[in-house]
Image: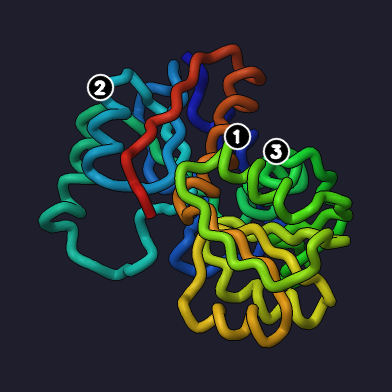
């Protein structure tokens, strides 16, 4: 059994948490403690009654999530929100959340991992906010047909909007929602973006400005960071870990 404080302190440092200015509701770090320490680590993208119950049933007592519990606080602890808390507390499962740090981290982050999945090197900062890169971009010589084929092998649903260069020189990555990333493309002179989801209004923008946009699913592009952090912490402390996958198609 590893003391909870040791894991929490390691996660805070490993994710470079203090460097990222996130939304107040993200509340990065330990969101709920337990009283017994940690014997098994879990990873999930989202909070919810179902993943919490699955974690407890799997013997997880330290659950790492990307989207934490407190986005819409303050709120009463009633209904499903009460069920979430009571499931974790009765199951002795602590909850640790990491949002922007697990998007932008140069090693463990969703966007760096997205780039490396395609054999690219995430060396170019993209979506820099308060001095930290949330997304990443890579130099590329991939033809867009090869890029699309590789993504279709990796992700169950890929929407391709292809009006940019047939062989883009740079590819940007923004996991989850890419709505803030398209204007950044135009400012940075990059014409190709791999992201999770976009609003419909960006389709005519892609036509007008000549962009390649690849939408791979919000959830699907954000499984990587929590898995990478859980695996890293598990190695550091000699603990088992598991990923609690859901059937989220979005």
Whether residue 53 can be seen here: yes
Figure check: 165 above or below 37:
below
Give the number of the mark in front: 3 or 1: 3
Other-residue count near label 2 (Cα within 10 Å), few / some / many at <14 / 14–19 / ≥20? few
The image quadrant where one finds the C terminus is: bottom left
Figure check: 70 above or below 58:
below
Q: Are marks 3 and 1 in contact (CB under 8 Å)?
A: no
In the rendered structure, find residue 117 and report the number of the disc placed on it.
3
In the rendered structure, find residue 50 and report the number of the disc placed on it.
none
Give the number of the mark in front: 2 or 3: 3
Residue situated in front as seen by the camera: 142 or 219: 142
The residue tagged 1 is 229
x and y percentages locating residue 152 in the rendered image: 57, 44
Residue at point 50%, 83% (across, down) = 201
Q: Are marks 2 and 3 in contact (CB under 8 Å)?
A: no
In the rendered structure, find residue 57 and report the number of the disc placed on it.
2
In this rendering, position of residue 235 left or right of residue 36: right
Report which quarter residue 165 is drawn in: bottom right
Q: Secondary structure at mark 1?
A: helix
Whichever of labels 3 and 1 marks the residue nearer the N terminus, that label is 3
In this rendering, position of residue 249 left or right of residue 238: left
Whichever of labels 2 and 1 marks the residue nearer the N terminus, that label is 2
Report which quarter residue 164 is drawn in: bottom right
x and y percentages locating residue 139 in the rendered image: 88, 55
Residue situated in front as seen by the camera: 112 or 186: 186
Q: CA distance from mark 2 to mark 1?
A: 21 Å
Residue at point 73%, 41% (across, down) = 118
């Amino acid at each position: 059994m590893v003391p909870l404080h040791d894991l929490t302190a390691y996660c805070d440092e490993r994710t470079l948490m203090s460097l990222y200015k996130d939304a107040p509701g993200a509340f990065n770090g330990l969101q709920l403690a337990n009283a017994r320490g940690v014997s098994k680590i879990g990873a999930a993208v989202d909070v919810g009654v179902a993943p919490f119950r699955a974690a407890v049933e799997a013997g997880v007592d330290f659950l790492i999530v990307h989207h934490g519990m407190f986005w819409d606080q303050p709120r009463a602890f009633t209904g499903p929100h009460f069920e979430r808390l009571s499931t974790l507390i009765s199951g002795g499962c602590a909850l640790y959340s990491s949002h922007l740090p697990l998007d932008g981290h140069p090693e463990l982050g969703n966007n760096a991992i997205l780039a490396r999945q395609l054999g690219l090197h995430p060396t170019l900062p993209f979506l820099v906010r308060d001095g930290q890169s949330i997304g990443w971009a890579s130099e590329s010589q991939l033809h867009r047909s090869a890029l699309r084929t590789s993504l279709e092998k990796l992700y169950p649903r890929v929407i391709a909007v292809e009006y940019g260069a047939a062989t883009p020189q740079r590819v940007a990555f923004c996991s989850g929602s890419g709505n803030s990333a398209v204007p950044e493309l135009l400012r940075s002179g990059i014409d190709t973006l791999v992201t999770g989801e976009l609003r419909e209004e960006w389709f005519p923008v892609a036509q007008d400005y000549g962009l390649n946009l690849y939408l791979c699913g919000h959830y699907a592009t954000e499984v990587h960071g929590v898995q990478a952090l859980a695996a890293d912490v598990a190695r550091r402390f000699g603990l088992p870990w598991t990923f609690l996958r859901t059937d989220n198609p979005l």
